[in-house]
Image (cartoon, grey):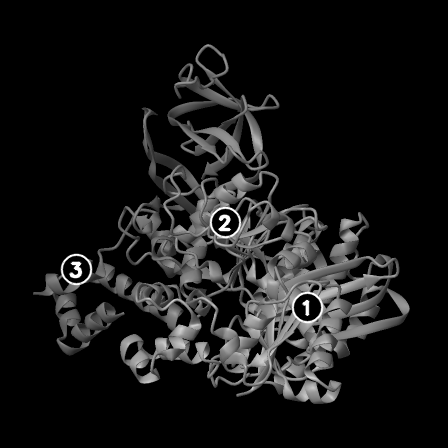
Amino acid sequence: MSVQLAIFERMFDHGEVPALALASPEPTRSAVEALQARINAMQRTTLDTKLTPTHEALADLLPDGGLKQGAAYSVTASSALVMALLAGPSQAGSWCGVVGMPEFGVEAAESLGIDLDRLVLVPHPGDQWLTVTAAIADAMSVIVVKPGRAASDGAVTKLAGRLRERGATLLVVGTWPQTEAMISITASRWSGLGQGWGYLTQREVTVTVSSRRSAAPRSGRLVLPDPELGIRRLDPPLGAGRGRLGAVQTGGARPAPVTALPRRAS
Amino acid sequence: MQRTIVLWVPDWPVIAAVRDEAAPAGNAHPIAIMAANRVVACSAAARAHGVHRGQKRRDAQGACPQLVVVAHDDDRDHRHFAPLIDAIEERAAGVQIVRPGLVALAARGPARYYGGEKAAALALIGAVIDEGVMDARVGVSDGPFAADRAARDTRPNSPVRIVAEGAAAAYLAPLPVSTLADPELATLLARLGVRTLGAFTVLPATAVRERFGPAGAHAHALAGAADATPIIPRTPPDDLERVIELEPPLDRVDQIAFAVRQLADDVVEQLAARRLVATAVRVSVTDETGRESDRVWLHPRAFRASEIVDRVRWQLSGSTRRLGQKPDAALGPGLASPVTRVRIAPDSVDATVNHEPGLWGAGPDDRVHHALSRVQSMLGHESVVTAQRAGGRTLAERRILVPWGDRAVHQRPLDRPWPGALPQPAPATVFPSRHAVTVIDGRGDVVLIDDRLRVTSVPAAFAPGAGGATRPIRSWAGPWPLDERWWDTAQRQKIYRLQVVDEAGIAWLLVLDGGSWWAEARYD
């Protein structure tokens, strides 16, 4: 935020933007677009504080730049990815619930940054998984559910209403009718293991997020798990890639980074 | 000098062990109670074989090969001694518990009430015999030390020894200095040529204090029967447990829970009046057939009345589940047989001060608790768990799942090295029950591990046991053996572990256990 403030201060105090506008029309348009994007992004986070704190390595991949409260996300079968998504809210002090996943690895969860004191597991909800999910949506900020039996559309809509009302985020392991985005691991490469020697040390994954709101899916490379940090981003984050301009950027025409502005003016 | 009655039950730790069914009953069995590899108490039969206090375990077993060795347990001694104290307190007030098996009382009151010290002593022995302890001895003298010595100077057929008032010093005089239970002082005195308590009392008190310090001065006073330490009677503990007799017996959980509500309120109020809270509660439920279900429930913080009622309900539905009936908590399950009696007793208590909610609350907020309690009422108490890490070598050992509202009992500390545990990172998916797989080499033969811890051939692929799709192995490492608890037939395991990465880039933990391969976890 302080960087952004600094940019605005320069913009208004030193009249750099008008100077730019006179100098060349072409960069101005992209600069204005970038600034609008930046303003949009800031307005989103300041006016609608409906985001659950998300781990920074994953935040920019998601539409709106984080997990939205009251929304459902579909995560394709990877426990580590689920844990990475839980890590942010858990570290920020939220309670997390995991329903129907007896295989959830507690040790891995802790090493990825989930606070076990605020993690509640319902390993075997049986046929009542939907009721259980609705019940703990009252208290938990993020709920992971692995659906048992298929749910009816009516029940899903009812649950979605409950989630919106309570501001809880639902992560579904598997498919789900109304999701904000589908998060999956599209490539995975473990290192440390050879032909009969070594042991698993770390893994590079490509996380792909596809949503209805953006035409092309977004991908990012992560180290998950990383021996020191737990979760680490490999490629640079998608800079101003938030909000409405997300689709445009992933389409290829990426505007110049805003941080280049002062340098150009001088 | 205060006249004192000391009541001594010989070999109390042995009697407590027999009462606890930790040792066989009957006088014929030689039993020894051991602490730190030394005998602390033994039965008369063992003593007849030459076992004595302070002996090493090996020597004791050498002296008596059929010796039954029981580990010492101070809790057990106290627990079984409590009813005896209650019985003694009914006959005479002001009992000081010196240790389990040994109590001291001021003699004046009982002596006047029963008409003489002898009569009082016999009354106390009668109280103990009524509790089923056949051998109890009483000594009466000036001061607890002399009375204690007098009690030990008795025989089963003459269990009372009374030393007349003022005669205590003369009575103690011929006893050796080792009676003082201070081995260092006793050795020193013996080397100085002082061998009896009488010889010790001859020394001037000021000289003794200068030479041996306050401890020596106290011993000197004891030896001269001049010790003025008063008897400090115990305060009888308040009766905090509550019992409800259900007449007619109830057979529905919701009815019983309703009936118990008042009881739980009572327990919590009683504790609150003493500025206490319960952190563990013992719930005993007796049914019509006389069967008793007894369980201690722990709480991560402190019990409220409604939480005690919940525990009673869980205990009732738990006992029906064990009997193979379908638990139907919403309607109240039919119990095996109607319940006649519910007893709630605080098992451990703590001062209220330690459990005051802070300004921002303590523990999880009520909303979380209510939501989870609701799920527990739907699925049962064990269905909602929080996880904790623990030490251990296998993945299953390295976590503890604690039902919501319970407190974990840690058995394996995390900060030990645990050689043989898997290196980090831990797998994200740990299968609740491992899946059978087959691991094959390039020619399709099953890979095994030989006695020199080598794979018989290079693993090339693995497949789920029931003929699933084969997954080629890209890289692998191992086998890492784990051979633990070979002395314990129930818990021993000898397994070999293999980490493999399949062609989708997902890693697996495969385990060879008794000739067959299993997939235990997935690094996804």
Instruction: Please name the amino acid that badge 1 sits on.
Output: Pro
Say whether mark 1 and mark 3 are on the same chain.
no
The reply to whether residue A162 is in sight is no
Nearest to the observer: residue A75 or residue B283: B283
Residue B159: give its label.
1
Note whether B291 is above or below B515 in the view shown. Answer: below
Q: Mark 3 to mark 1: distance in Å?
A: 102 Å
Q: Position of residue B71 (x, y in %)?
A: 55, 51
The reply to whether residue B97 is in sight is yes
Residue A260: give its label.
3
Say whether mark 2 and mark 3 are on the same chain.
no
Question: For numbered disc 2, what is the local secondary structure?
Answer: strand
Neighbours of disc 2 within 10 Å: few (<14), some (14-19), many (20+): some
Sooner in the amino-acid sequence: mark 2 or mark 1: 1
**Quadrant (top left/top right/bottom left/bottom right) for the N terminus of chain A:** bottom left
Note whether B497 is above or below B165 in the view shown. Answer: above
Residue B163 lies in quadrant: bottom right
Q: Chain of mark 1?
A: B
Question: For numbered disc 3, what is the local secondary structure?
Answer: helix
Q: Mark 3 to mark 2: distance in Å?
A: 50 Å
Left or right: where B367 falls relative to B342: left
Question: Residue tagged by mark 2?
Answer: B399
